[in-house]
Amino acid sequence: MAETAHPLEDLVALLDLEPIEVNLFRGQSRDIGGRSVFGGQVLGQALVAAGRTVEGRVIHSLHAYFLRPGDMEAPIVYDVDRIRDGKSFTTRRVVAIQHGRPIFNLAASFQVEEDGAEHQDEMPEVPGPDGLENEEQIRRRYVDRIPKKYHDKFLRRRPIELRPVDPTDLFEPEARPPQQCMWFRATGKIPDDLRLHQCMLAYASDFGLLGTALRPHQLSFAHRHLQAASLDHTMWFHRPFRMDDWLLYAMDSPSASGARGFNRGNIFTRDGVLVASVAQEGLIRVRND
C-alpha cells in the first residue's frame, strides 16, 4: 500500500479495509517506528471490520487482547463473527490473523441511540493546547541522540498531532507521579462520519497510555533494556465528538506489578465533555541481557 502525500489521508486509507469475502476484510500496515505493528492501528482496523457488519447502531464499548506482535510487511485479515443482533444491542467478535495465526482479538458492542440519565467526571484543570510544543517539536530536540538511520522514522509526520502538557525527557527521565495529560487532534479535516471518528479515536488511544506507568520509575521508551507492549485494551464511548477538534487525554496508572502496568484514561472535548474512557494493561519488563 503506497503512502499518500498527507499522513491523515494515509491513515484514512489505512482504515478503509478491503472486503475479501462475507465477514472477511484485509488491511495493510504502516511502520511508525516501532518493532512491530502499532497496536492502535490493529485496534482501529478491527473496529472498522466490526462496524462494516452493523447497521443503524454505533459502538459503545470494546474489549481487546494483543496476542502476538504484528508483522508490518504482511497484510492482516480480519474475521468478523456476528455473535448477536438484539433489539437494542449488537455484538461482534473480530480475530486479526497473520501467517495463519491470530495476533489480536476484539469483542465490540453496538447500541441504538437512546436517552437516559446523564453525569460525568470533571475535566482536570490543565493548560490548553495553544502554546504547548507538539511531539514533532519535542523530538527534534533529541534527534542528535538517535542513530542517523532512524532519523526519518523518528521525525516522520503523523496523522495525529500530540501536545503533551508535561512531557518526559526521553533520555534522562525524572521520577514523576503516574499521571499525565496530553492534547491531541487529527492534522486535518475529517468527513462527518461518526464511525470514522470513533475508529480514529481507537487508533489514537494507544498513544501515551502505557508510558504513564513508566513515569515513577525513570523509564521511557528510549531505554534500551526496556521491553514494553500493550497486552489488552478496553474503551467505552460515551458521547459524540470530532477527531479534528482538540481532545484532552487525562491518564493515570493506579498500579504496576508483576512486569505489568495498569493504565486508565478519560478523553474530553476542549469544553469539558467526557467522550470516552480507556483502560489498558501493558508489559513493562527491564531486561538485563
Image (cartoon, helix red, strand yellow):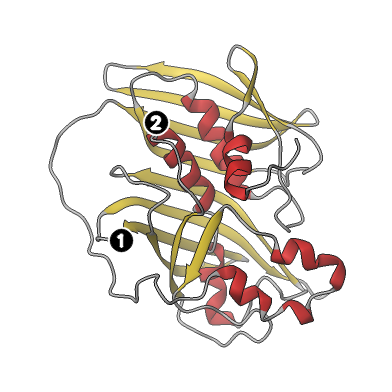
Q: Is residue 150 left or right of residue 155?
A: right
Residue furthest out toward the left: 117
In the image, residue 41 lies at what x, y percent? Answer: 61, 44
Q: Is residue 203 visible in this depiction of the protein?
A: yes
Disc 1 marks which residue?
270
For image coordinates 45% across by 32% down, the residue present is: 108
In the image, residue 237 lies at what x, y percent? Answer: 35, 43
Front residue of 223/147: it is: 147
Disc 2 marks which residue?
109
CA–CA distance in space, label 2 to label 1? 27 Å
Q: Secondary structure at mark 2?
A: strand
Mark 2 burial class by Cα count in 10 Å: few <14, some 14-19, many 20+: many
For image coordinates 63% across by 78% down, the residue present is: 219
Residue furthest out toward the top: 22
User: Quick check: 152 above or below 241?
Assistant: below
Residue furthest out toward the front: 5
Q: Is residue 61 left or right of residue 255?
A: left
For image coordinates 87% across by 66% down, the residue present is: 149
User: Quick check: 202 above or below 248?
Assistant: above
Q: Amino acid at mark 2?
A: Ser
In the image, residue 84 lies at what x, y percent? Answer: 41, 18
Asked whether the beta carbons under mark 2 and mark 1 sit within 8 Å of each other, the answer is no
Front residue of 154/98: it is: 154
Q: Amino acid at mark 1?
A: Arg
User: Quick check: 5 above or below 158?
Assistant: above
How many numbered marks are there?
2
Q: Earlier in the sequence, mark 2 or mark 1?
A: 2
Q: Is residue 120 left or right of residue 41?
A: left
Location of the C terminus by quadrant is bottom right
Q: Secondary structure at mark 1?
A: loop
